[in-house]
Amino acid sequence: MKAAAHLLLLAASAAGAEPVRIQVLGLFRSPLADLQPAGAGPLIVETPRGNVVLEGRATLRLRAANAPAALPPGSRFRLRIPGKIDRDYHGALRVQEDGAALALVVEMEIETAVASVVAAESVPGAPPAALQAQAVVARSFYRALRGRHSRADFCDTTHCQFLRHPPRAGSPARDAALSTRGLTLEYRGRAIEAFFSSRCGGRTRALAEAGWAISAYPYFAVECASCRRDRRPAQGHRVGLCQHGAAAMARGGAGFRQILAHYFPGAEVR
């Protein structure tokens, strides 16, 4: 089993994969989770008591008291917190004990994570260019801010970036990730921790206005014509990309590079 996992890791590296480790479903602090296959093939779960093979609708109950457990890269699986939530994932899984709760860490290819963020975070009905801008922002955040948590690089909540199921092939979110694959916002040669919020109220804020001092990128305040016309209250911290403003720019014919140049002056897409 370990040899097979090692070969899968080598294959992923050879294909140019860039993994990120995301702790999932941690908000529930649950001592239990159910694991099921989410693809056509079986799952081979490594446990201290030996390997467990799951096929079809077979379920393995994961318990904090019985951790650790693991799945190799490339696995397609479903995690369920009984009576609360279930989500599908594509990647490797590491299950650990975190006090009385489970720590569930999924290592997925960065483009899978980016597509999942675009699907979960974007404005409903946003045009392709706005989704592409969101994809570049999400990828930049992942590249610039690894190691935000002790057990993983990121979490799946709005503390980092919200994500749900990986979107299907051919979906707008998946297309946005693929069409911008590898592109990152950079400032002075380094990826920036790109932020976004829903509505800026007509003008985004600089870091000093927000009371933040966490970025090498200055985050200039910029005007947002769409939010100024709408006169709706701001939603979120108003730093970086305004999602509703980006969607309006895209509807007006702007490409994703124009959108990013507007909300991140001085940064480059590379």
Image (tube, grey):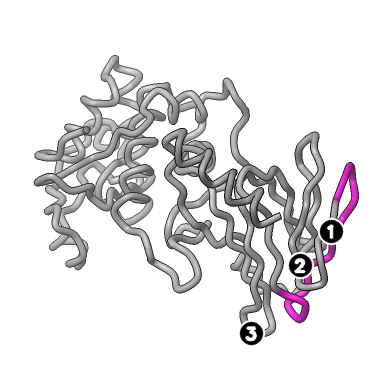
* Up/down of 10 relative to 154, above or below: above
Task: Report the front residue among 233 and 55.
Answer: 55
- The magenta stretch is 54-67
Q: Position of residue 252 (x, y in %)?
A: 29, 17
Q: Quadrant of the N terminus?
A: bottom right
Q: Amino acid at mark 2?
A: Thr
Q: Helix, strand or loop at disc 2? A: strand
Sort mark 3 into few (<14), some (14-19) or many (20+) by Cα contacts within 10 Å. few
Alpha-carbon neighbours of circle 2 within 10 Å: few (<14), some, or many (≥20)? Answer: some
State the image coordinates of residue 254 (x, y, percent, origin top left): 26, 19
Query: Which numbered circle lies on residue 52?
Result: 1
Q: How many marks?
A: 3
Residue on which the image places disc 2: 47
Q: 86 or 66, which lies in front?
A: 66
**Residue at (53% x, 37% y) in the render:** 119
**Label 3 secondary element:** loop
Type of amino acid under label 1: Val
Among the two numbered marks 1 and 2 on one chain, the one whose residue lies closer to the N terminus? 2
**The label number, if any, that marks residue 99 in the structure image:** 3
Q: Amino acid at mark 3?
A: Gly
Residue farthest to the front, as pictured: 3
